Amino acid sequence: IGVTGVQTCALPIWRIVMSVEQQYIDLYTQCKSMICKHSAEALNAFRDEAFSHFKSLGFPTKKLEQYKYTDLSKSFAMDYGLNLNRLDIPVNPYEVFKCDVPNMSTSLFFVVNDSFYKKELPKSNLPEGVVFSSLNDFAAEHPEVIERYYAKLADNATDGTIAFNTTFVQDGVVLYVPKNVVVDKTIQLVNILRSDVNFMMNRRLLIILEDNAQARLLVCDHAMDPVHFLVTQVAEVYVGKNAQLDLYELEETHNNTVRVSNMFVNQEADSRLLLNNMTLHNGTTRNTTRVTLSGKGADTNVCGMAIADKSQHVDNNTFIDHAVADCTSNELFKYVLDDSAVGAFAGTILVRPDAQRTSSQQTNRNLCVTRNARMYTQPQLEIYADDVRCSHGATVGQLDENALFYMRARGIAEKEARLLLMFAFVNEVIDTVRLDALKDRLHLLVEKRFRGELNKCQGCAICK
């Protein structure tokens, strides 16, 4: 972000002595006091148990069914700097990072690497009682809330990346919306990746919407430097009775970035949720999404789009749990893969015995532009109730030659015809966005991506 010579690493870069896991086991053992010193007690209370699980589980490899297409242990093997001592990064993102999407007014906040930027906060005018702040600060001020919600949906015993994040995380973001409060203005969170050396960041996102609350959150990931970044993120989302949450995630980083995200959502009765995860540019991305419909009448829409080329890798793993009756879910993921890119999608919908009158639809459509691109898709339905309407399906193919011929016969050049067909292919996912200004800009961004004009992140890609 225009700043050079910033030393962001509080410790020397650690070298691998034994296994990939061992370097981090040694790091935590030697630096536990430093990690805890800069974290609230409410967060520290979960570290030792998580560390124990990490030592037992390690990083997932392709030997595990749910990671059969993505070996994350290789990503963690590189030497990274970590800012465990929470050194200040002398930059004001409000001065150097602008997001001027026409007609989209947001309350704009920043996380620089894995620290919530609080030196200068926007005049967001959030409704009374609404909190959008540093997770570490919130944990110090409201330990009872952390004790109730933190690390409850994300089980450290189930996945080594979750246990690793809980062990090392020191900050993140919390969004808290009290009962009956509607946040009319969209909240935008920009995660800035900034470092002069290969760098790892571990961050947390805690979202709590109480009964009858409403909010919209746009989360953007941007990498500012060409070094190797590794990001682990764990998000826990609570949507109360009759509450409504729209959550958009936009990744626009570069080829040297690894993103490991685990999101867990619990929906109460009559709640409404829209999740839309869009990967426009990346290196290696693994997104895990788990949604539990635990109250009658809950409705969820889980959408995703990935555009990848070169040797980029995008893996989305989803699980929608219909735990009670009379709930609805709709899932739509689309991939466009060029060059030697690899895509993976594994989606499971579970309908439990008591979840009668469930309505669920899962769709995964994929476009391989070249013969070297690879797509692995695994849609699954597990139904243990007899009064349901459920469907699932997946397709993998190339551009329709008949459609290409039709367009070329009408004077459209082949390259332009291919771009138009690819754009039309992903448009269905973009149309699920309920922010008109963002939707319009996404149309432009996707077109630029297909034309090769978004080959790296330069400032705020949304503004370009």
Image (cartoon, rainbow, N blue to C red):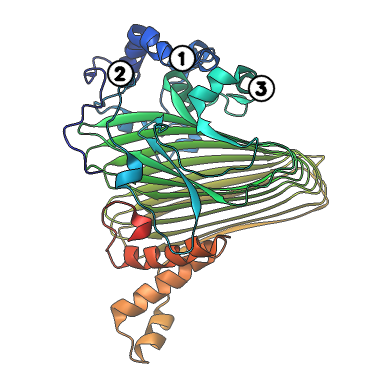
* Position above or below: 342 against 429: above
- Cα–Cα span, label 3 and label 1: 20 Å
User: What residue is shown with label 1?
Assistant: 51
Question: Relative to residue 379, is residue 102 drawn left or right?
Answer: left
- Quadrant where the C terminus lies? bottom left
Q: Indicate the position of residue 333 as horizontal and vertical percent values.
A: 52, 56
Q: Secondary structure at mark 1?
A: helix
Q: Earlier in the sequence, mark 3 or mark 2?
A: 2
Three-letter code, disc 1: Phe
Question: Farthest residue toward the left?
Answer: 5
Percent position of residue 43, x then y:
52, 18
Which one is in front, 273 or 8? 8
* Pointer 3 residue: 148
The residue beneath circle 2 is: 19
Residue 358 in picture, x, y percent from top left: 77, 50
Separation (CA) of disc 1 from disc 2: 16 Å
